[in-house]
Image (cartoon, rainbow, N blue to C red):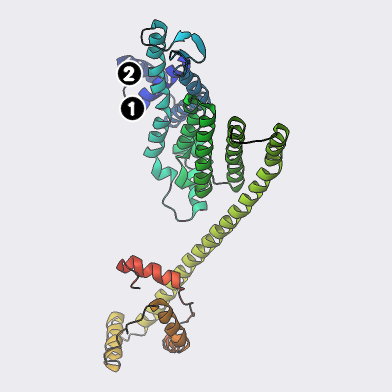
Amino acid sequence: MLLVALIWILYAVRIYGLEPCLFRHLRRRAKRRTSQLKRRELEEIHHAHIEYSLLVTYLVLPTVAQAQFKGLNCLTLESGRQYLRVDTSVDCSFESRDYQLMLGITIPFILLYQAIPIVWFYTLYTNRERLNPPVTDARRAYEKRAKDRSVAHLRFLFSDYRCSGYYYEVLDMYRRIFLLGLLPFIEVPVVRAAFGCMFAALSCFLFREWLPYYSVTANSLALAAQFQILLTFSGAFTVLSSDFNYNDDLLALGLVVTNVIIVPWMTWMGMRTMAKHEAHDERTCKLQTQLLKDKTADRDKFEAAWGRLRAAADGVEAEEQVLDGAAKLADLHHHKPMQQREYGPNGFDELIAEAVSAEDAMHDTMRGFVETMGGHYDRGPLKNKERIMEKTYSDYGTYYE
């Protein structure tokens, strides 16, 4: 534990730039010896050291935190005296020198180790623009992040997660620390099991809503593991509670059946649901790609049409010709346009019905106008009610119902 703490202190000092004179001196000597190395090689060595330091802390943190919290977990006897649960020879009293010594050692190390995920989050957050690229397509953002060499040394902290959930490992680490280190402080076993059930149920709900992993399979397996934890605490609550009449053999059989049948079934259901989400995302990606292609094609067509107009201008500037045509169009349609009428309580439905009745005539008119000007007209669909409500609210701040 002392070795890991030393490694962590060195890493934290390096991250926050608090190197004392000794470290600066050692770095100067190292620079002289490695002056022949290329800058990229030095950067790779630096990233490798950070990666291995973070990996060591990641591997030992849950186990060490569990052992540290055991040093604070005391057992209360009927007499009212408290003794350390893992070593009943130690009196949990500030009058005991052994207990004072243990607190003096344990509490600083607890603070040190519990700060590890916070430094993880700080390191990830400072690189958030690279870990969560501002790309609309989730697949492209994930691929771009995977190819970014500047955050490769942090990859084991975020590589399995979606770009928007790059910091989930920090939350999951504290979840494990709570289950392993803090939950045992509840002395009454049945109450401990009840709190475990509530916390596991909350974890299942949040995980199911969030689904932080990028892979569908990883999300399914992790969700199944969350449900297994919930079922285990539920079984413990059933055993410890005196309000339930149960048979040991039936309870054991039920737990086995649950883990062998129900959990795989939930995994399959989760995979099917997430596969639908993935198919939806893929379809959205294709539509966005096609939209970009259509925009490019429209721009090329506009440039070509503008070039023809400029070539046939006969000495008149193309801009002037367009403005003159717009002025003539305004003269032809000089009457005041009909104002929008007011709608009743079912305003959106009435608006959609009116749009449907006028749709064919509007498209025929627009098609004739566009084709007369040498263009190509593609008929688009009407917006549905949900989209109209969304745009109304976003533009005006109300639904006008």
Expressed as whole percent of the image width and height from the top left, the position of residue 239 reads: 62, 31
Report which residue position mark 1 lands on: 16
Q: Disc 1 residue type? A: Tyr
| Residue 351, picture quadrant | bottom left
Q: Residue 29: image x %, image y %?
A: 37, 16
Q: Measured from the top left, where is residue 254 in percent x and y?
A: 70, 39
Question: Which one is nearer the viewer's eye here, 297 or 105?
Answer: 105
Where is residue 25? Give x, y as percent: 33, 15
Q: Nearer the viewer, mark 2 or mark 1?
A: 1
Q: In screen coordinates, is 351 left or right of 192?
A: left
Label 2 residue SS: helix
Locate the C terminus by quadrant.
bottom left
For label 1, count other residues whose C-alpha is less than 10 Å away and answer few (under 14), some (14-19) or many (20+): few
- Of label 2 and label 1, which has the lower sequence position? 1
The residue under the point 36% across, 11% down is 94
- At 31% from the left and 23% from the top, the residue drawn is 18
**Frontmost residue, 31 versus 396:** 396
Quick one: 245 or 401, which is closer to the camera? 245
Marks 2/1: CA distance? 14 Å
Circle 2 crowding by C-alpha within 10 Å: few under 14, some 14–19, many from 20: few
Residue 24, disc: 2
Q: Which residue is at the far top?
A: 97
Query: Vertical placement of 233 versus 111: above or below?
Result: below
Looking at the rendering, which quadrant does residue 204 occupy?
A: top right
Question: Could you tell me which residue is drawn at 41 percent across and 30 percent down?
Answer: 39
Q: Amino acid at mark 2?
A: Arg
Q: Left or right: where does residue 299 sit relative to residue 290?
A: left
Whether residue 391 is situated above or below residue 306 in the rendered picture: above
Q: Is residue 35 visible?
A: no
Q: How many marks?
A: 2
Q: Is label 1 in a helix, a strand or a loop?
A: helix
Does the image show residue 25? Answer: yes
